Image: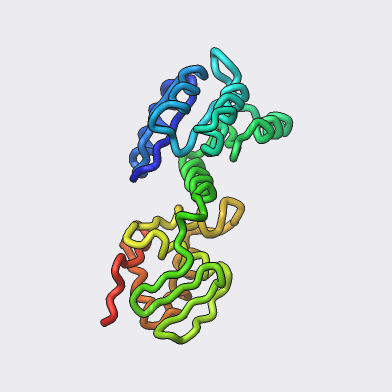
Amino acid sequence: MAHRILIIEDEEDLVATLAYNLEREGFETVGATLGHDGVDLATGTPTPDLILLDLMLPDMPGTEVCRQIRADARTRKVPIIMVTAKSDEIDRVVGFEVGADDYVVKPFSVRELLLRIRAVLRRAQPIAQREDALSLGRLRIDIPAHKVWVEEEAVRLTALEFKLLQTFVERKGRVQTRDSLLSDVWGMEADITTRTVDTHVKRLRDKLGPAGTYIETIRGVGYRFQTEPSED
């Protein structure tokens, strides 16, 4: 099911631009240009999976919108990314103090915002939804122990390689773009390029031996882990 993003922003053109780019990436969107409307949409049904919140709204401060959303039990844990022209340190501090999960300063690139959205959604995923032990074809993974076996032979992976494999397996059957992998595996602070993803995927495949073919290359897009890896 697609993640639902609530955009609370008084610039209608920006709402339309964000909605277009988010929907193109597979998200559902709903927008509000007033703070009060944004609170109503946030606490209504269905609850959004993430909120993009402008700090400078015509009817009420974005910080107050954030406080009201955090005060409601239904939306207390919904991730909030503040999107604002205010770049002073004190504004960032206040944003985080009232409950923001991330803070993006205008003007921003849509690509950066998408990376941050994916990273925040990933962090917000309940641990209970993740499988601890997996057996897929020749591959067996013990996630808490950070151990991997291929045909019952232990495979030694670096922490980054294990995280990359875990990301693929937990999203098996779904195409992962290089940008999404950069965000979710390396994190926004990593000063690297998408070529690094290709290099690490190659190394991971090599270490997995016969199970390396489970990671498919989707030309021009990224990678996908087979839903039902073949034993042949």
Query: Percent x, y for residue 126?
Result: 50, 50
User: In this rendering, would 63 be left or right of 121?
Assistant: right
Left or right: residue 29 versus residue 192 is left
Can you see residue 79?
yes
Against 193, is 49 above or below? above
**Eyeballing the image, is 109 above or below 188?**
above
- At x 58%, y 30%, the residue is 70
What's the residue at 46%, 69% (across, down)?
Answer: 133
Rendering quarter of residue 68: top right
Q: Residue at x 58, y 16 (%)?
A: 60
Q: Where's the C terminus, which quadrant?
A: bottom left
Along the viewing direction, whichever of 142 and 56 lies nearer the viewer: 142
Residue 43 lies, with reference to residue 223, above or below; the image says above
User: Whole-percent x and y of residue 158?
Assistant: 57, 73
Q: Quadrant of the N terminus?
A: top left
x and y, in percent, of residue 105 in the image: 59, 34
Which of the pair 59/187 is nearer the observer?
59
Q: Nearer the viewer, residue 91 or 68?
A: 68
| Vertical placement of residue 230 versus 103, above or below | below
Q: Is residue 106 visible?
A: no
* Position of residue 140 measured from the top left corner of the image (x, y, whole percent): 43, 76
